[in-house]
Structures are given as structure tokens and as C-alpha cells.
Amino acid sequence: MRMRTLAAVAALVGLALPASAVVKTYDATAPHGTVGDEILFTTTLCPPVQNTPGRLQGQYRLEDAAGGTVTLTEFGLRRLVSTDLGPDAITVVFGPGSYVFVTSDSSMRPTEGTTHAGSTAPGGSIDWGVLSGWSRTGTAFCISSPLSICTVSTQVPHGITTVAPNPDSPTYDLGTWAFDAEGDMAAASPYIISTNNGGTTNIQFIIRGAFVGGSVPALPLVGAGALAIGLIVAGTRSALRKK
């Protein structure tokens, strides 16, 4: 009888805690800036490229089911922009007296909860491919001369702090994320988030993050209930045997 009871409880525990899943957090903000996200500005579709560390901040959570699949449970990519392009930088295009000043504090994310094949273990990787449902939250401000630099080039009304514009596309290819021996994560290649001037210039994001900890995901109500019932049954039978 005792063995059957233990077997039943074990089965319920297995239902409540499937596959030994773990939620891992990766951070690209201070003090993890040395492995943090970066922006790449390209002057053509090929290099030269300008790295800009510190312009992006990110925090990502991945639930690794330890069975060959990983779920993106949180994607937080914050872009901090403060750009002052004086006359020397833009008069060639827009003429004497032209300028633009842009500030932005916004976050981008795809639809969270998508699951792909892969592993977050050291040496593991995940090929996310194209993720959909991208959205942006936050604010933006722009002043320029001529006004069209703001309204056309940045999609932000001149002289007004406004909601940050939607991403250029609802889909982006995040490519492959790889995990090193320390557990840190880095994308194998950047993804393009903006293409301008007929495809001759673009802005690319590199996703990277330091591993900062893992935890067991919270039990769903069904699983927690099954575990509780199993423990109660086992305890009750044990008490009855002692009488």
C-alpha cells in the first residue's frame, strides 16, 4: 500500500513540475554594460559600421523546458537617443541653417510567449527566426529646420513630445542567440530595425546580455492543486496507519 501511495504522489508531482523547467534572466544594463546591447549605424549596406555601446538597454527572460524547447517570456529592449546634428552635419543635404535635435526613450518588444527549439545551456543556441507582433512604447521629441526632417525622417511631430512611433515593421528576424561557458547570451548577428535612403543606410541592433540568475517557474493552479492533493492524501493515509 505504501509503495502505491508514493507512486501516486510521484505521478502528481510529475504533473505539477514538468521537465524541470527553469526561467533564466539576462541583463544588458549596468553593471552588465560590457556585454550589453549595441546599435550599429551603417553608411552603406556594407561596412563601415559605427558601434554605439550604452545606447540600448535590455532585459530578457527565457524559460528553458530542459527538453529541447525554450520560451521567450520577456523581451525588454530600451533605446535611449539624444542626437544633436548641427549645421555642419546636414547642410550638405538640407542647405544653410538646417539642424535637427532628437530625444527618445522607448522600448520595443515582439509578441512574448513564443516557443522555439533550442537550449540555454552553455554551448547551446536558439534560432528564433522571424518574430511578429512588434510594438513600441515610450516618448519622443524632435525639433528641426526644415520641419520635414522631424515629420518625415523621424515620424515625430516638430516641437511636440509625443508617443514614440510604431516600429518600421511588425516583424523582425532575431536570428540565432548563443550561450557561452559563463551562461551569457549574444546574438550571432545583428538585426536591421530601420532602412533609409533607398536601402543605402540602416540601423542594426545587437542583442546581448549577461546571465544574472535562474528560478523555477511558478506552478500553474492545476499543477499546484494536484501537488497539494497528493501530499494531503499521502499524509492522511500515513496518519491512519499510525492509529
Image (tube, rainbow, N blue to C red):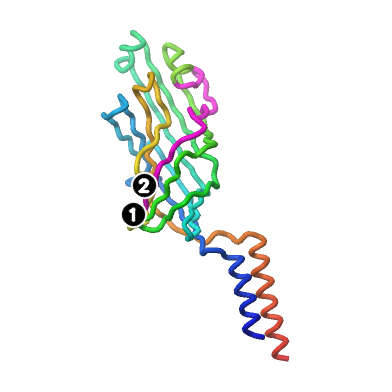
> As rendered, which of 190 and 35 lies closer to the eye?
190
| Magenta region includes residue 157 | yes
> As rendered, which of 8 and 231 lies closer to the eye?
8
Locate residue 57, reporting x and y percent: 42, 41
Is there CB contact under 8 Å for labels 2 and 1? Answer: yes
Q: What residue type is labelled 1?
A: Asp
Q: Is residue 48 above or below residue 2?
A: above
Q: In this view, does 171 lie above or below 17?
A: above
Locate residue 51, reporting x and y percent: 30, 35
Which residue in the protein does label 2 denote?
A: 186
Q: Residue most toward the bottom? A: 243
Q: Which residue is drawn at 66% across and 73% down?
A: 230
Locate residue 128, reporting x and y percent: 45, 44
Locate residue 169, reporting x and y percent: 49, 29
| Magenta region includes residue 239 | no
Which residue in the protein does label 1 denote?
A: 180
Query: Counting residues from the N terminus, which is met first, the one under dot 2 or under dot 1?
Result: 1
Under tag 2, what secondary structure? strand
Predominant SS along the magenta part: loop
Alpha-carbon span between mark 2 and mark 1: 8 Å
Packing grade of label 2 (10 A; few <14, some 14-19, many >=20) is many
